[in-house]
Every structure is written in C-alpha cells, then in structure tokens.
Image: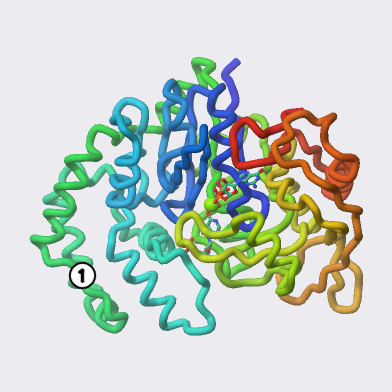
Amino acid sequence: MANKADLIVGIQWGDEGKGKIVDMLAQKYDMVCRSQGGHNAGHTIWVDGVRYALHLVPSGVLNKDAINIIGNGVVLAPQSLIKEMEQFNESLEGRLFISDKAHLNLPYHSLVDIAREKLKGDKAIGTTGKGIGPAYADKINRVGHRVGELLDETKLCDSIMVEFAQNRPLYEALGVKTPSKDELLTQLKEYKKVLAPFIANTTKMVWDALDSNKKILLEGAQGTLLDIDHGTYPYVTSSSTVSAGACTGLGISPKDIGEVTGIVKAYTTRVGHGPFPTEDFGDVGETLANVGKEVGTTTGRGRRCGWFDAVIVKHSSRLNGCDQFALMKLDVLDGFETIKICVAYEYKGKRIDYVPSDLENVKPIYEDIKGWDTVEGINEFDKLPQGAKDYITRIEELTNTKVGIISTSPDRNDTIVL
Ligand code: GDP
Ligand code: IMO
Ligand code: MG
C-alpha cells in the first residue's frame, strides 16, 4: 500500500510556530512540500543559536537528505526566492523543486497590492504587500503566468507586455509603473538563469514518492482563520490555507493525506486588520507581545495579542480534521498568576460555542486557570508544573483534540513529544 502524506496546518491566524515543528519533524521525512501561499509566509527556525527565516523555501531544507517541493498552488516571486536561496552556503539544486504550474508573482503584483491597500484607507486588509492577492486574482481570471513559462522568456515577456497594454488605464489610476519591455526581458532572463534547474513536474514527483513509500510532510502556510473561504473574510489571504487546500495545491487526493497536526499557539496573535475576539489592548496584550517577541517575520509589523480562544481552535480542528495539536510557545505564559481561556461567545444575546461568519459581533466568555512558574526549556512532560498540565488538559477538553507535541522555546530541542 502506498504511503500517506502527513500534514501540518496553522490553526489560528498564522505565525503559530509551523516552521519550528516542520523543521523538527523533517529530520524524519524524505520530502517536505508547500502547497499554497507565497512569500507572505515567514517561518522561523532556530538551530544551535542560528536563525533561519524562510518564506518560499519549505522548512525541510535544513535536513540535507530531504527533497523540498514548491507545489502548483503557490504563487512564486522569483526575486524573493533567489534572495532566500542565497542565505544557504550551498546550492539547493537537486534538493528543491518548483512546480511548472505554480503561478508567477512578479514585482508589479506587489505594486498593485500596495496601491490598492492605500486606496482602501481605513478599510485596508493590512496585507503583507507581497502581491499575493493580485497574483492569485490573475490566476483565477486566467490571465496569470506560470513558472514553466519562464523557460521561454521571450514569449513570456511578449505576453506580459500585451497585458500591460490592456491594463494601462488601471495601472495609471493606481499609480503603478510597469517595466519597459527591455527591463522586463532582462528580469525574466535573470530569473530563468537561476531557477530553470529547479522547475519540474512536482505532482509526478510527489506521486512517485508516495508510491515508493517515501515519508512526505506537507507544510501549511498562514492559518485557518486566514483561509479565503473559511477565514474572517475579507480580512484573509487569497489561498486555501486549510488542510483540504493541500490536495489541489499539490495534485494529490484526499486519500493521500495521513496524520494531520494542527499548530496552535498557547495564546492568540494576529497581524493585519480584522476581527479578533480575545485581543487584549492592555497589560496582558503587551506582555504577550514582548515576552513572545511577537513581531512579524515577513514585514516586521507588531502582532496583535490576546488570550487563547478555544472556540476558534475547536472550529479549526474540525475544519482541518486534526488528529493532534502541537501546542506552541507555552513558555510565553510563564509567570502569569491567572491565565484566561475563551470558552464560548456571547452573540446576539445568547451563549454560543461555534464560530459565526460575522466574528466581529461576538464577545468572549472567559474561564480562569491558575498559572504556573516556568516551563521554558522543559523537554519532558513529567517535569511540567501542574498548572501547565491542567491548562493543556483543559484545551484538549474544550477542543476535542489531543495535544501530542508541546513546545517550550524556539529551539528544536525544547520540545515534548507525547
Ligand atoms: P510560523 O509562521 O507558523 O512558522 O511562525 P513564525 O516563525 O512566524 O513565528 C513563530 C515565532 O515563535 C518564531 O519567532 C519562533 O522562533 C518562535 N517560537 C516557536 N516556538 C516557540 C516556543 O515554543 N517558545 C517561544 N518562546 N518561541 C517559539
Ligand atoms: P505564516 O505562514 C500571519 C496576513 C496578513 C494580512 C492577511 C492578508 O508566517 O503563518 P496577504 O499578504 O496574504 O494578502 O495578507 O494575511 N498574513 C499572515 N499573517 N502569518 C502569515 O504567514 C501570513 N500571511 C499573510 O498580515 O492580514
Ligand atoms: Mg510566520
């Protein structure tokens, strides 16, 4: 029987700590795949005091024996990937492959993204400004360009120039300056020179790996509440961030998915605008932001912070079919006398325990849990203080999902696997 691919998915609004867990697990996997998103993702890995920030390169890259795949569902910014590849002292040729069907996210997409956000004023989404929405919009409008087209850069250049001509009034209204034909061709030639050896039919590669019993790990980007369908629309990203998205984003069937691990922060954070019921504007939010070093890996923006919201986490577990959670950043709650968990919402005068589509209209209902001294750096379950054990048990009860991994520092080694 063919193997199944295990999946890692963000459960809240992203930045849960997916990079750390994928890196840790990747030591035991033959292949790590990204299936959606782009360089809006920022996955941080710490190994022996060295920090790696990954945006497009899958977090399996530090395992020298693993093959890394950027799937067809990703929007790929060549200039960003080329820069990212430079942080490694060796070539990734033979270890990194990009789907020829992934869509190109070119510099003008980013300019359009930023210009549109500016025009929206106080209705802005707070995007990363990386061109993600415009690149996916072109794909859905069937005017996008795929990575495979880079191999004939002259033809690609001609067809992008036709689009520039058609869209000139739009670009002018947005104040976006598009490159000249010569500038564009020079850019595309450079992308082709560096990236051509990496372009492949990655769906076939994943099938072959599954059929020959290789171990495959699928690395989600963003988080469930940022999903284009199931997130807090319109304050979402433009891809399917839930586990089902990994199938279309790689070309595998739901039957190919094995164990699903939801990555959950022990409290809640969000970057950008949009509803966030447990957001704390006082000392608690500030402490979580400072102790948790809650600054975006991609944009350097401060993350909004608040208590754990069990209602959204239960909802996300169901949406993604989680077999277990990895509970991250438990150490950031060290030293709080009392910790709060949101167990339900008040919504239209009633108590509810599900996520309504208009999340901006709920008020959180909290339960108090007694805090603990410290869990930082602990890597054995029995050594956790009782308060931390009680917190984990309560999360499991409220979300109907077991916690199988607990993380107590950014380092790969400070992790409890149950
Ligand atoms: P991702 O986007 O889900 O991969 O998460 P990010 O890398 O954007 O943000 C998570 C941040 O938390 C990174 O700076 C990690 O190094 C850090 N981190 C991960 N796990 C832990 C943990 O258990 N404790 C602490 N204190 N930091 C952690
Ligand atoms: P990782 O993979 C947190 C947020 C942006 C914005 C919204 C739309 O590191 O968890 P976009 O640029 O995608 O159009 O922005 O989505 N966002 C993220 N927030 N972590 C991420 O990725 C994110 N990627 C996008 O802040 O609110
Ligand atoms: Mg991140």
Q: Residue 7 appears in which quarter of the rendering?
A: top right
Q: Residue at horizontal 81%, vertical 31%?
A: 381
Q: Is residue 283 left or right of residue 392?
A: left
Q: How is the image coloured?
A: rainbow
Quarter of the figure with the C terminus: top right
Q: Position of residue 195 (x, y in %)?
A: 25, 40
Disc 1 element: loop
Q: Which residue is at the front of the view, 198 or 306?
A: 306
Task: State whether residue 161 appears in this view.
Answer: yes
Q: Which residue is mark 1?
A: 178
Q: Position of residue 344 (x, y in %)?
A: 86, 63
Q: Is residue 390 left or right of residue 279?
A: right
Task: State whether residue 141 appears in this view.
Answer: no
Q: Name the kind of residue labelled 1 in the image.
A: Thr
Q: Residue at horizontal 73%, vertical 73%?
A: 282
Q: Residue at horizontal 68%, vertical 64%?
A: 305
Q: Which residue is at the front of the view, 359 or 164?
A: 359
Q: Residue 234 appears in which quarter of the rendering?
A: bottom right
Vertical relation: 277 (above or below) 218? below
Q: Position of residue 239 (x, y in %)?
A: 51, 55
Quarter of the figure with the N terminus: top right
Vertical relation: 83 (above or below) 92? below
How many numbered marks have been drawn onto this rendered protein structure? 1
Q: Which residue is at the front of the view, 179 or 391?
A: 391
Q: Position of residue 322 (x, y in %)?
A: 72, 40
Within-10-Å neighbours for mark 1: few <14, some 14–19, many 20+ = some
